[in-house]
Amino acid sequence: MDPITTEVPRIEADFLPSAQGYWSDVPPEQWNDWKWQLKNRVTSLDGLEQHLLLTPEERAGVILSGNKLALAVTPHYFNLIERENPGCPIRRQIIPHVGEGAFSAAEMADPCGEDSHMPVPGLVHRYPDRVLFLVTDRCAAYCRYCTRSRVVSGAGEQELHTDFDEAIAYLEKHTEIRDVLLSGGDPLLFSDGKLDALLTRLRAIPHLEFLRIGTRVPIFLPQRITPELCRMLQKHHPLWMSIHTNHPRELTTEVRDALAMLANHGVPLGNQSVLLAGVNDSLPVMKSLVQKLLRCRVRPYYLYQCDLIQGSAHLRAPVHKGIEIIEGLRGHTTGYAIPQFVIDAPGGGGKVPINPGYVFFHDKEKVVFRNFEGRVFEYPEVQEGDSTRSSHGTEKGDLGESFPEILHDEVCSL
Ligand SMILES: *Cc1c(COP(=O)(O)O)cnc(C)c1O
Ligand code: SF4
């Protein structure tokens, strides 16, 4: 066996350049042009095999991907793949695998039930005050575990037909919506002009307080983050951005510089990771990732349990792994570095936090809990009002109702 394949994956605590790698003969002005990067993506078996030694499982996966989720890797990201290591964490995210053809009973094409929560094509309204706006079905590169693989890339049967006018009309009418999350696909594949026009239309809706963009472009295509783009985004504040990074090696010097440019233009940055087997289902890898993100001024936001997307079993790590990772971070590193671990409830229940258990016992008298070292503590529960009032409240069995009453009595007796 090749000695490289048996090596433990490297953990990159420091920023390394992707540089031009396999494309070192390309003039730098082309290399640094995001349109060149898109045009020169690796999209075929031949293209992959020019540089990589594929396994039979990968070759079969590539052939299978043609009518499911397209294969596409930007040259920038391709350079991060270890040539001879099929276990490479970058590779597992982006190179198709025959496992994508194995569907299990629990898996679904639309695991988060998005299609059934679309009042308008392309607009998912699941939570009371915010919506997910799917503005495109194209990405800079395609993640093999993508929760929207049913629509992204254009390779599968289902298509995304976002109706922009209808979506804007819906947002104008629904004054309860205060937060719009642009996603897809990847909104940063729009030209500056097109994105500017869309953001301007959204900004014209007075009740929209907050806009955000979900994007993997800074990771796949850092060349897209130009001063012109940043100046345009800056006009639409408050505009937040959620990037998507899974492994510390993805944070190259180019990515770091792109993130710095966004942060310098006042864009608050969060990160979403998906817990993936053989990629980041280990505490040292996640710890290195989240600490590196803080150095890029990116706040780790969510760690997702991998959705039950069809053909993703080979990439799904067990839920207990995610809990162990959070437990291994809390108290052991900067609080800002710790994402919230969530499961997006199958069928459309939304994101549900999944936490390590720190509370052993909690009643009216006290709460008993442990700290990150396992030491056990007790905190006396605060007694609300005097004993008659709190027992009155308890009898009703509904703290929510008894609260205003207690407060009201106390304010009157002052
Ligand atoms: C994730 C998501 C959001 C945003 O959720 P936050 O917890 O506010 O980040 C909104 N709508 C849908 C459908 C989502 O999946
Ligand atoms: S960038 Fe996002 S939407 Fe695009 S393939 Fe990856 S996970 Fe899916």
Image (spheres, grey):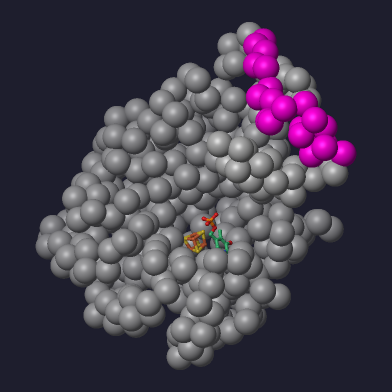
Q: Is residue 314 left or right of residue 390?
A: left
Foreground residue among 194 and 316: 194
Question: Which x, y percent locates residue 43?
Answer: 44, 66
Question: Does the segment drawn in magenta span residue 383?
Answer: yes
Question: Which x, y percent locates residue 70?
Answer: 52, 69
Question: Does the segment drawn in magenta span residue 175?
Answer: no
Q: Residue at x 30, y 79 (%)?
A: 200
Quadrant of image for the N terminus: top right
Snapshot quadrant of residue 262? bottom left
Residue furthest right as drawn: 395
Residue furthest top as drawn: 375
Foreground residue among 389 and 300: 389
Quadrant of image for the C terminus: top right
Q: Residue at x 39, y 41 (%)?
A: 299
Q: Residue at x 80, y 45 (%)?
A: 398
Question: Which x, y percent locates residue 8?
Answer: 51, 26
> What's the magenta region?
376-395
Position above or below: 206 against 54: below
Is residue 286 at all visible to an observer of this figure?
yes
Q: Is residue 163 left or right of residue 118?
A: left
